[in-house]
Amino acid sequence: MKGLTKELVLELAKLKNEPKWVTELRLLGVKAWNELVMPKWAPDLSDLNLEQIETYVKPDFEMVKNWDEVPEEIRKTFDELGIPEAEKASLAGVGAQYDSETVYHNLKTEVEKQGVVYLPMEEAVKDRKYSKMVREYFMKIVPANDHKFAALHAAVWSGGSFIYVPKDVDVEVPLQSYYRLNAPGAGQFEHTLIIVDEGASLHFIEGCSAPKYNVANLHAGSVEIFVKKNAHMKFSTVESWSKNMYNLNTKRAIVEEDGELEWISGSFGSKITMLYPMAILNGRGAKFEYTGVTFAGKGQIIDNGAKVVHVAPDTCSTINTKSLSKDDGVSISRTLAKILPGAKNAKAFIDCKSLILNEGAKAEAIPEVKVACMEAEAAHEASVGKISEEALFYLMSRGLS
Amino acid sequence: MTQKLLSLSNLTASVSGRKILCGVEFSVDKNETVVLLGPNGAGKSTVAAAIMGNPKFKVSGEIKFLNKDISKLSVDKKAMLGIFASFQNPVEVPGVTTTEMLRTVMEEKKGGFVPLDSVREEITTQAKKLGQNIWFSERELNVGFSGGEKKKNEILQMLTLKPKLVILDEIDSGLDVDAGATISKILADYQKESGCSYLIITHNMRVLKHLKPSKAVLLNEGQVTAVGDVGLVKRVEKQGFKTILSEICQEGEK
């Protein structure tokens, strides 16, 4: 299937035999895709021709729970990536997606006994016990009309994982979902939904990779994370795409009272990456800590960063980004910390460090701080520095307007 | 005839309802050095802050620079007119180097591109006078600087930006004896070369060594208590504020 039309989406929905509400969201996505324009503030995407992108690629076998049943060729790919081995050694559960569909999904019995739910997204939307919960959260913080590629994602999403950690359950060993895009000229649109209930804790690892082809590939996944009161979530992600990949991914989280979200991100490869994980600190005392590393090599534009919105009082965020650029690579650290009027005593700190390895490579840091609350503290390291009134006055007293 | 560079009349300033300056009046002529004296809490630093328009203070009154009222101008506009103020505690600004900051100001002044090489060349020339090199300026603005380094950085910025009026608030604090003398010499040289004026707030007469103050303004409780010549500076140094202030008080009663 190539391109994006209503007919294609309906065909995909039929193939997946999904509930009506899911298909309705897909159609909302189609509508939004037709209405929204391409982002104009970012790297040029005009070379990306969606008509040429395979929006759905179905592997010719069904998902299994045992690596031995995974077809040789696909298993070899994951073997080389070390996924089955890692599962045995240090993971509580693994999901593996090959192109559009999940090929392997397994959760260790002891974790399952704790009540932890780890399901392929397609199963989750139909699951007798959890579909109601999924419906309540699915595409709520990354809605179909959020932006052009969120719309595309909503329309043709396929694969991904649903994770639910019940109240006060501490998942000691990490869960991992791995996304491999193997088909040339294809798109991957997995959806990950994670709910960490009150007092629970989870470490989730996401890995992505693809081999190189001469035609453009597109990754427009979506991650939605809900960190409830007193819950703790660690999200680690490594995206190592081939250099024909457009990686236009949307990841967002909402953190409630005294919840903590720790985010570690490595963004490598791809032709163009536009990725800005976002945390909404919605409850008093919620915390967000983001550490991101990017590398932009030959012919690559990595536009990466993070966003945080402080809604509630006493919230705290730290965003640290480190970027490297080499050859004619361009790395852009785009970060935003927004403090809303009610977020008294909020603290936000942004630190963007860029290193240019040779002449010809480019690095740009665009840290932005928007403070609408007088009793908050925000600082960033980059062109303007600590946004205390004093520092601002100091710079202006030298003639900076 | 001497020309007025800066004149203050009926300058008042308050912070959160508390009055700190109550109608300060004095002026600074072109190519003149004026010393602003006064005991702790007299409001000296507030005079500097009020002239520059620090948003912490509510300021009223008239501030004339080259016969134009500048009291409503934003601080960057004042800087562009050629006013430079060195603050008592220079702020640390992470993420921006001194060079970057100076280059941006130069570009705003020029209204166009200024090559980095020429900025560095100018900074190198000025830094040499302070016994520093370009690396001093390539560090993040004041971040992790010692008290003395911060003050040297203020002077470096001043020399590079070439202002007409320089307000120095305790420029000598944090400097050792030798550095204090060096700075005094540098200030005198720059005045000779540029014809600039100084408004110097200090408790330490060392910084005046090479300068020839023509006026001393004594501030107490937010008001100008006395205006005199360099003799007043010497009197203060010898007798202290308490004695002088009580003498002035008695003189007033006579």
Image (cartoon, coloured by chain):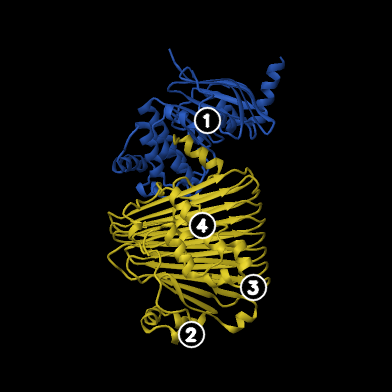
Chain colours: A yellow, B blue
Q: Which amino acid does label 3 sit on?
A: Lys
How far separated are the C-alphas under marks 4 and 2?
Answer: 39 Å
Locate residue A139, reporting x and y percent. 55, 59
Tell me if residue A384 can be seen.
yes
Q: Give the residue at mark 1.
A: B52
Gap in angstroms between the C-alphas marked 2 and 3: 24 Å
Relative to B232, residue B2 above or below: above
State the mark number for residue A129: 3
Residue A319 circle label: 4
Q: In the rendered view, would you say B186 is above or below A140?
A: above
Pointer 2 with pointer 3, Cβ within 8 A: no
Q: Circle 1 marks a residue in which chain?
A: B
Q: Residue A66 carries which label?
A: 2
Of badges 4 and 2, the one in the foreground is 2
Q: Which sits in the foreground, B116 or A30?
A: A30
Closer to us: A302 or B49: A302
Secondary structure beneath dot 1 equals helix
Give me the disc on residue B78: none
Contact flag, marks 4 and 3 (Cβ < 8 Å): no
Q: Residues within 10 Å of mark 3 (few under 14, many from 20)?
A: few
Where is residue A208 drawn, in percent x and y?
A: 42, 69
Disc number lying in front (1 or 3)? 3
Q: Which amino acid does label 4 sit on?
A: Ile
